[in-house]
Amino acid sequence: MKSIELKGTMKTFLTIALAAGTLGMYAQNANVVNAYNYMKDGDLAKAVEFIEPAIVDAKTGANEKTWRYRGDIYRMIVLGEDEALKTQFPDAIEKAVESYMKANELDTKESYKVENIKALGALQGTSLNAGNKAFTAKEYDKAIKDYARAEMIAKAFGQVDTNAIFNSALAYESKGDGVGAIQRYRDALAGGYNKPEVYRYISSLQAKGNDLDGAIVTLTEGRTKYADDKDLIMDQMAYLLQADRAAEAEEMVKLALNKDPNNATLYSVLGSLYDKKASDAKEEAQMIEWYTKSEEAYKTSIEKDPKFFDSYFNVGVLYNNRAAYEYEKCNAFKSDAEYTKCKTGADEIYLKAVPFFEQAHELNAEDVQTIQQLMKLYARSNDQPKYEAMKALLGE
């Protein structure tokens, strides 16, 4: 009899346990149903209240539908116009993405794959737009986070969101993280964001970090893909000049002129390169040859753009330097006659600068260096009224 009673007790216990388990499972299924119904009724806060317990349950949490409903609820919060609700659930977009990802993982028959991908696509666009909004507001850390989410969603489906990657590079650069920006720009290139300006942005950051050689290498890399891009050529020329690699810079200038033969700036740069060669020349004949080439380049620049201040000023400086060399030679003469003859020739060269500095002054009346040069020239030519006028401009 005791054994029979024992069996009866065990049976009763198992029945109670089974009933409790059934009730628990029913409760969680009810949570999913309630969450769905509240979502359909538009009460999303209440839907959240019911769906959250369901995802942590062993049974309903292993069901694709539970996660898909959860994704729908949070997506509706994200895409809706209820700002209070968005404030109440600030991580709604993260939870929506997480939910659809999990739903896809559990959907082994891929019954809702297209539906989930479509929903994720909307969230990807929302993430990108949120990043752009944060970027405009100069909330760069938030922008980077939003762009990373957009990138992550695309990656989950074997795609690359190069816009998100590129924009995140801009955010890193804007917040002053050059290293992070360079890496993100390179990630954009690797992902297929093939635009020549990316190489310019990378090289600019490298140059700012005093890595001129790295900047030049980056631009060389860019020009293997965009050989005719004028901006890449111009940037590489500028960095070569900064790196004191004049011979290579000269080649780049000539290459750039082939692409843009009417560019006054390029002729002015070429004139500067020749001017430097003149200054570095060991022999007088070489010096005069390079001064002549420099003069020609500057004057061609002026022909291309008659309002280009730099070339007028640089021609004036060129005559100044050329005359300084002649004045130095004059000091070696012993006789007054020879000295006077030499000085007269030097003065002629020096005074050639007058019309060029005058034109430079006309183009930029506030440039102090131009005014100072004109004062010296007017003093040398004994033009007292003009000398006094320049002196007055300096407040002397």
Image: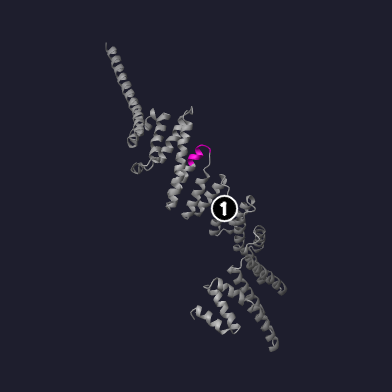
**Stretch of the chain drawn in magenta:** 152-158
Nearer to me, 368 or 60: 368
Is residue 166 something one can see in this rendering? Answer: yes
Please identify the residue farthest to the right as the structure is shown.
285
Image x and y of residue 387, in percent = 55, 82
Residue type beneath disc 1: Glu
Image x and y of residue 300, in percent = 66, 67
Nearer to me, 96 or 62: 96
- Displayed quadrant of residue 97: top left
Q: What residue would you read off at disc 1?
A: 197
Image x and y of residue 88, in percent = 34, 42
Query: Height in image: 1 above or below 360?
Result: above
Coloration of the structure image: one colour
Q: Is residue 16 left or right of residue 281?
A: left
Determine whether the residue tagged by mark 1 lies in a helix, strand or loop.
helix
Q: Residue at x 51, y 37 (%)?
A: 157
Q: Is residue 295 left or right of residue 208?
A: right
Image x and y of residue 356, in percent = 61, 74
Is residue 282 something one can see in this rendering? Answer: no
Please identify the residue farthest to the top as the structure is shown.
1
Q: Is residue 302 left or right of residue 208?
A: right
Q: Residues within 10 Å of mark 1 (few under 14, many from 20)?
A: some
Q: Residue at x 53, y 80 (%)?
A: 389
Q: Residue at x 60, y 56 (%)?
A: 231
Q: Is residue 190 magenta?
A: no
Image quarter where the N terminus lies is: top left
Tell me the chief SS of the magenta region: helix
